[in-house]
Amino acid sequence: MTSSCVNHRCKVVSVIFGGFLIHLALGAAYTIGNFSPYIISYLRNRTDDTSVQNVDVLWLSGMGSAGNCLGLIIGGLNAYRFGDRIAIFIGSIVFCGSTALNYFSVQKSYIAWITTQGLVGYLGHKLTYGTPIQTAIRWLPNHATLAAGLIVSGTGGGSLVFNQLITEYVNPDNLSPDYIDDDGERYFTQADVLDKVPTCFVILGGVYFGLQMIGLSLISEPPPKTEGENKVDKSRVKKNDFINDVQLVKITEIDPGKRDDIGHYNKGFETSEEKVKEISDFSAKTDVNKMEKIPQDNEDNITEELTILQAIKSSLTSRSFYIIWFTILLINIGMQFFTGLYKAYGQTFIEDDHFLALVGSIAAVFNCAGRPVWGAVMDKAGFRVAIRCVSCGFAVFSGTMLLTEHFPKGLFLVWICAIYFFFSGIWSLMPSALAKMLGPQHMAINYGLIYTGMAVAYIIGSTVGTSLKATIGWHGLFYIAAGLAAIVFFQSFLFNGVDRSGKRI
């Protein structure tokens, strides 16, 4: 093994671990389901917003929807203009700063809190979110799903760590909510709990910033490709090979000097005297009439990186892009009822605050571990099989959530963990599918376009949750989540995405 190969692998490990730490801090945003009962109780007792309810935390996501979309797009543009490290630093300042500012906003009003935590916090979250994934995929372009899964597993792991830290700081004595309103909702009024809510935000902001600065120190961009590495030599491409208008690339010689980003020589191709194995398998086994076509307006578009405008145009003219968009929309409408309200729901039949915090932490383990697992499933079986497994499992456990009320509290833990495990697949499958379809160079920008679906989901979920919960109850919300996941399962049959070499994703 050469020294350059060892150095390359060390760089890859460093980038993956750095991105993991950055996402570990970002994952703390998903502790809101555990933290929100303390916050809502504080607002009811220490501000003029005495009528705010647990379900109103859903508008935190609604307020953050604009920040989500803007953050990913601006973050991608920052990375393109300033480089990955500066883009991540800018996002970290906004994310960690907004967390600390909640010390003031939570003491002011409900609107002030959801503005700093939702709009500004989600903006900072997404300014930071996409760039580490994009960087890792550029280091490992042939293992994009694995790279994305390892990075975003940190997002899942953040809840594991910070759920316990928050609960141990705010409610170390395991006090249960002592006030029950006319709708049966429970709230804290104990001063020992409420007094610690504002300062908790300051502590969290400092810890997040420390983690992200350590992660940033480990991030580096891959060396730029030479012209010869970035483009297939025209003398080696037979340009007239088409199958139903899909252009195929055939390598006519082996050039030992041309390697891909992880050191393979012309991976997957044979000499001109034999058929190219990947192309022959593709044409024999796949009905390309049902697949996305590769644009032919540029003879080198299969191997050259797309410009920003080309990447956006390719997204907005692709059926598969919209399938991914609706998948994120539908799953996240339902998931809001669990991420933001699982603890409020559990408090209606479980009087153990530390156990409910533990539920969130263990669920975070499944959220963390599930991401590389689903990435591996996609690499092995393809996007359509993976998303069908994810949506089917999510629908089953969401629709049967009410069973947990009639059994020991351990079943509630099992169900929440299962829901988080299946949901975790969304954040492994979607970025890798986009990278395969459009290339990793502008993935963060295209991910921002995809996140418009998340924005719509937050608004719809917030509206449905706050307006219908009193009418349809907890069970009705869970049935809605299950039905939307079932739609995702059936729409997956319409997905026909291919990567830039024409292979089905």
Image: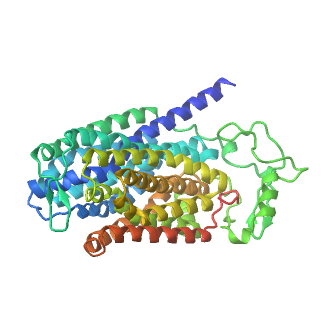
In depth, the one of 466 and 459 nearer the eye is 466
Farthest-out residue, right: 273
Farthest-out residue, bottom: 471
Q: Where does the N terminus fall, quadrant-wise?
A: top right
- Residue positioned 29% across, 63% down in the render: 58
In depth, the one of 497 and 410 nearer the eye is 410
Image coordinates of residue 361 in percent, x first then y, are 36, 44
**For residue 289, what is the image quadrant?**
bottom right
Q: Is 434 positioned to the left or the right of 40 in the image? A: right
Chosen colour scheme = rainbow
Q: Is 224 positioned to the left or the right of 463 in the image? A: right
As drawn, 476 above or below 271: below
**For residue 480, what is the image quadrant?**
bottom left
Image coordinates of residue 444 in percent, x first then y, are 48, 53
- Residue positioned 38% across, 67% down in the render: 478
Residue 220, can we see it?
no
Count of numbered marks: 0
Q: Is 201 positioned to the left or the right of 462 in the image? A: left
- Residue positioned 29% across, 70% down in the render: 473
Q: Is 159 positioned to the left or the right of 239 in the image? A: left
**For residue 186, what is the image quadrant?**
bottom left
As drawn, 76 above or below 393: above
In depth, the one of 140 and 204 nearer the eye is 204
Residue 353, can we see it?
yes
In depth, the one of 387 and 479 nearer the eye is 479
Image coordinates of residue 111 in percent, x first then y, are 18, 61
As drawn, 463 above or below 23: below
